[in-house]
Each structure stands twice: as C-alpha cells, then as structure tokens.
Amino acid sequence: MHTKREKQAGRLRILSRVYMILVLVFLYAPVVIMIRFSFNNSRANVSWAGFTTKYYQELFSDGSLWQIFFITVFIAAVVTLLGVIIGTLGAVGMRKAKFPGKSLIVNSIYFPIVIPEIVLAVALLLMFNFSGTSLGVPTIIIGNTTLVLPYVYITVKARLVGMDPSIEEASMDLGANRIYTFLHVTCPQIVPGILSGAFMSFSLVLDELIITSFLADAETVTLPMKVYSMIKKGISPEINALTTIIFAVCFAALLIYLILDAIRNRKTKPAAV
C-alpha cells in the first residue's frame, strides 16, 4: 500500500516530466517549423502548399547569399579565435596575479554582459569615429571580440577553479618553464572550458545583429543583417533552407562531441575490481 509520501513523490515525478516536455516543445517547436517550411512549395511562410526541395537547389546556386554567409562565418571564426586566446590567457593570468586594482579590472570584464548591447554598440561606434577608424570587417571583429571575451573568461575561470594547483607546481619543480607548463599541463586540464567558450562565442557572433549593424560599412552585410532586411518583404524560403543546414551541421557537431566525450570518459574510467 502506497504511503502519502510515495504518492506525492509520484505526482512530483509526473509534473516534472510534463514540465520538461513543455520546455522542450517551447524551445524546439520554432526550429521544427523552420525546417518544415524550408520544404514548403510556397514563397509565403503562411500555409503548407506541398513538399519541395527546389529552395535548396536555389540556395546552392545563389552566389550572393553564400558570399554573405561565408563573410559571417569568417567574422565568427576570427572573433572566436581572438576571444579564446585573449580570454584564456586573461583567466590564467588573473588567477594568481596580485596587484592594486585587480578586483576593479576583473569586475570590469563582466560589463559587456551586464550592459545592453545597444549601449556597447553606441560606445564602440563613438570610439571608432573619434579615433578616425573606418568602419568595416575589422571594426566588426573588434566589437564582437569585446562582446564574447567575458563568456570565454567565465568558462575558463570556472574550469581553473576546479583544477589542482599542485600539478602546475610539480611541473615547475621538475624544471619546466611557465610556457611548457601552460601548454602541457594547464591547457589539457582546461580544454572543456576553452571549448565551451569557443562554441558559445561562435554562436553569439554568428547571429549578432546590433553591434555588427553599428560597426559595418555600406558594403559589409552579414547573414543576420540580410535576414533582418527581409522582414518587411517576408523571409525567403532560401533563408529557411540555409538556417536548416546550419542547424543540422551544429547538431551533428554537438552529437560527435558528445560521442567522443563519452568514449574518452569510458577509456579513463577505472575498471571495476
């Protein structure tokens, strides 16, 4: 006979599952609709008019759209690389550094997360205009690097907190210099944090609109800017096809990462005696 506590636990389990299902539906329903309409035989994303793959064929023959896409990916890749290098070195360097004003510098790193993006975009635009710097891809890269730096710093810092400092000290005691210790001891320990920051940075820059719009010149157009300009006329099904491909590639990359991580954990897991 079930006790009152067991009945309450059963109801809580049911409610938690329903809640989780609702959250998943809320998150992924727009993605499913987007994928569905990428195969819709109609340029208006209003009603279903039949299955077709012609918009994927038009997508692969649209050179201008692919040029915009590759520019966007190039900016995201460069920003991710700069953000990972600067953020990782900053997190490692700030961990044991002691100097006046350290707390002020550390706390100021979080400003791009706290303040609205529109404020950061206006501030960067004023800075570039005041310094006489021409707007374009370089200014977009600088602005987006400023945006993603805190995310890399936070993820790497969190990984460093759980790292045993005696490992680095042992490496130094055995005669290794700081560079060798960083590359062969510290980096392997914080790789998950670096990868998390890199993935987060790449995804943020790939769909960044506000800062990119403020810092771009008339000739530079990224994918978010292109999609935003289509809102009044209606989103082209080619965009649905392109975003579906991007989603599929990201999902496949995440799946591969999870499989490799599971294999690595299985190899490092001690065998039962």
Image (cartoon, rainbow, N blue to C red):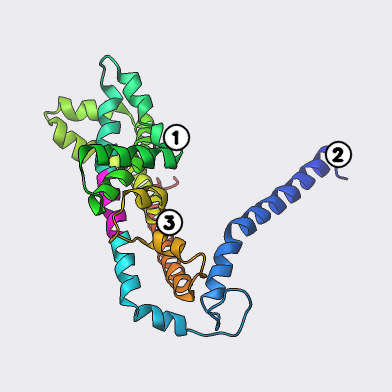
Q: Nearer the viewer, mark 1 or mark 3?
A: 1
Q: Residue at x 39, y 57 (%)?
A: 257
Q: Which mark is residue 4?
A: 2
Which stretch is magenta? Answer: 73-82
Instruction: Compare residues 66 and 175 and report the one nearer the observer.
Output: 66
The amino acid at mark 2 is Lys
Q: Is residue 136 above or below residue 192?
A: below
Q: Quadrant of the C terminus?
A: top left
Q: Is residue 1 left or right of residue 224?
A: right
Q: Is residue 166 left or right of residue 172?
A: right
The amino acid at mark 1 is Ile
Question: Dot 1 surroundings within 10 Å: few (below 14), some, or many (20 or more)?
Answer: few
Q: Quadrant of residue 187?
A: top left
Q: Residue at x 29, y 69 (%)?
A: 67
Q: Is residue 14 magenta?
A: no
Q: Position of residue 159 (x, y in %)?
A: 37, 36
Disc 2 on helix, strand or loop?
helix
Q: Are marks 3 and 2 in contact (CB under 8 Å)?
A: no
Label 1 sits on residue: 115
Q: Earlier in the sequence, mark 2 or mark 1?
A: 2
Q: Is residue 80 magenta?
A: yes
Q: Position of residue 174 (x, y in %)?
A: 14, 28
Q: Are marks 1 and 3 in contact (CB under 8 Å)?
A: no
Label 3 sits on residue: 258
Instruction: Compare residues 127 and 11 and report the one nearer the observer.
Output: 127
